[in-house]
Image: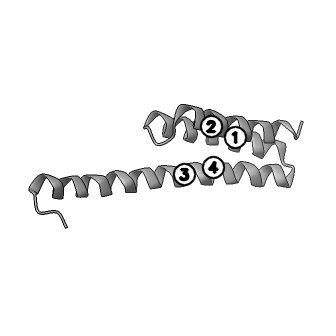
Amino acid sequence: MANIKSAKKRILVNETKAARNKAIRSKVKTAIKKVEAAVAAGDKVAAQTALQAAITEIDKACTKGVYHKNNAARKVSRVTKAVNTLA
């Protein structure tokens, strides 16, 4: 356990940041699952709508530093490719 005041503060700040990052990652995963479910159901309109929402969530996560830009680009590419297979 930390004894120094600044170290105690760092622990609290890190916990707050970890919780925020976890929530953002969870949103991204949920959005991607919605796209995959729509693709599995073969519903093209729902898949495209879910794709736009997923891309938005991924871009927000990338902007906030939760994901590296290449990781975000890879996720966008994979879900877009999945939706495009319905065409």
Residue in the image at 84% along x and 55% along y: 41
Instruction: Say whether disc 1 or disc 4 marks the residue closer to the N-terminus.
Output: 4
Marks 3 and 1, how far apart at CA: 13 Å
Amino acid bearing label 3: Lys
Q: Secondary structure at mark 1?
A: helix
Instruction: Say whether disc 2 or disc 4 marks the residue closer to the N-terminus.
Output: 4
Amino acid bearing label 1: Leu
Residue in the image at 83% along x and 54% along y: 40
- Res 51 label: 1
Q: Secondary structure at mark 4?
A: helix
Disc tally is 4
Instruction: Say whether disc 3 or disc 2 marks the residue closer to the N-terminus.
Output: 3
Residue in the image at 65% along x and 40% along y: 75
Name the residue tied to disc 2.
55
Marks 2 and 1, how far apart at CA: 6 Å
Amino acid bearing label 2: Ile
Across and down, in percent, residue 80 comes to 74, 36
- Asked whether the residues under the numbered discs 3 and 4 touch, taking CB atoms below 8 Å apart as contact, a structural biologist would say yes
Name the residue tied to disc 4.
31
Name the residue tied to disc 3.
27
